[in-house]
Image (tube, rainbow, N blue to C red):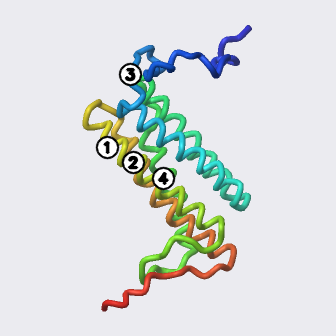
Amino acid sequence: MNDDKHRISRVTTRSGDGGESGLADGSRHPKDAPVFAALGDLDELNAALGVLRTHTLGDLDGPLDSVQQRLFDLGAELAVPGLIRLRDEHVSELEHQQVLLNDTLPPLKEFVLPGGHPAAAWAHMVRTIARRAERRLVTLHAVQSQNTVSLAYLNRLSDFLFVLARALNQRHTHPETLWRNDHG
């Protein structure tokens, strides 16, 4: 039997019943440790991206799949200290995808309120989760050395998701709701 095909053979291990959990390097930590907080936010972000993918059009599936793959790479980096999977080219690819979408949009004249078409609303929701994951990673970086590319990637991801939300509203011919600056 090839071990690579069955790396996760059991879901329930009972090893975390006492409030600790293990990383892929074998180390054990309290479940509220910064590394697990960051991993949890990445997991939530990836799950939300999965929901978003069910609401998007076909040409966006490739870029969103790539983001989900990179988030697993980032999780692997957190679970195995010293492992480097995210690279500058991943940040550049995300920037490129953002530019492609942004070039189809009218210029912004005011802040956009989250919402609109359900797909766009989901993109905004995922964007806020990405921002939280980024903040959590900043906290982790303060106590444990990490790949600095990961911060840039999550920062670009929230930008990409904002532009994606705008593009989804446009594709579904749903007008954006702009903030009304009633105070001048």
The reply to whether callout 2 and callout 4 are in contact (CB within 8 Å) is: no
Tag in front: 4 or 3: 3
Lateral position of residue 88 relative to residue 175, left or right: left
The reply to whether callout 3 and callout 2 are in contact (CB within 8 Å) is: no
Mark 3 and mark 2: Cα distance apart in space: 21 Å
- Tell me which corner region of the image, top left, top right, bottom left or bottom right, holds residue 8: top right
Tag in front: 2 or 4: 4
Residue 168 lies, with reference to residue 29, above or below; the image says below
Image coords of residue 66 (percent x, y):
59, 45
Residue bearing mark 1: 138
Image coords of residue 168 (percent x, y):
63, 69
Q: Residue at x 57, y 44 (%)?
A: 46
Q: Earlier in the sequence, mark 3 or mark 2?
A: 3
Name the disc covering residue 134, or none: 2
Residue bearing mark 4: 129
Mark 1 residue type: Val
Mark 4 residue type: Ile
Q: Earlier in the sequence, mark 4 or mark 3?
A: 3
Q: Residue at x 60, y 50 (%)?
A: 49
Lateral position of residue 60 relative to residue 125, left or right: right
> The C terminus lies in which quarter of the figure?
bottom left
Local crowd at mark 2 within 10 Å, few (<14), some, or many (≥20)?
many
Q: Residue at x 70, y 60 (%)?
A: 55
- Tell me which corner region of the image, top left, top right, bottom left or bottom right, holds residue 44: top right
Q: The residue tagged with tag 4: helix, strand or loop?
A: helix
Tag in front: 4 or 1: 4
The reply to whether callout 3 and callout 1 are in contact (CB within 8 Å) is: no
